[in-house]
Image: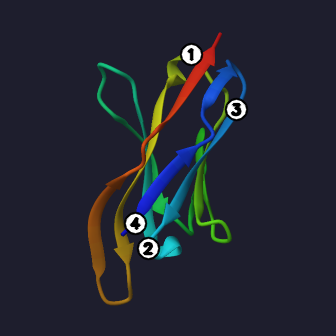
Amino acid sequence: QVQLVESGGGLVQAGGSLRLSCSVSGGIFRDTRVTWYRQVPGREREFLASMFASDSVKGRFTVSGDNAKDTVSLQVSSLKSEDTAVYLCHADKIRTPYEMYEFNVWGQGTQVTVSS
């Protein structure tokens, strides 16, 4: 069974950057689809980026996978107070040459607070 554990949150200053990690266990890491979201109380959960763990996505929200550590990282640059949220990773698919296995697993989330 796939399990996810986020880490790396905390208090950061506006204008800085932050790197969060999502440790993935129990599956086939490079073929597991991992999605990063963030949640602010009272607002809808916001999609940030999605990829299979061996890939990468670049932008203000840069996501990359580390096959050696079975970890998917989310790097956020130019932090603003509006980036304050609980950041969560989610896994829902494992691809194989023959079929796609689907499931629904969330990490516990990690709080990021940006001070201005």
Residue 22 sits above or below residue 29 on the image: above
Name the foreground residue: 108 vs 112: 108
- Give how far apart the Cα atoms at labels 4 and 3 are: 29 Å
Label 4 sits on a secondary structure element that is loop
- Give how far apart the Cα atoms at labels 2 and 1 are: 35 Å
Tags 4 and 1 in contact by the CB under 8 Å rule? no
In the rendering, which numbered label is found on residue 17?
Answer: 3
Residue 28 falls left or right of residue 68:
left
Circle nearer the N terminus (1, 3): 3
- Give how far apart the Cα atoms at labels 2 and 3 are: 30 Å
Mark 4 burial class by Cα count in 10 Å: few <14, some 14-19, many 20+: some
Residue 104 sits above or below residue 45 on the image: below
Circle nearer the N terminus (4, 3): 4
**x and y percent of residue 25 in the render?**
49, 66
Tags 2 and 4 in contact by the CB under 8 Å rule? yes
At label 4, the amino acid type is Val
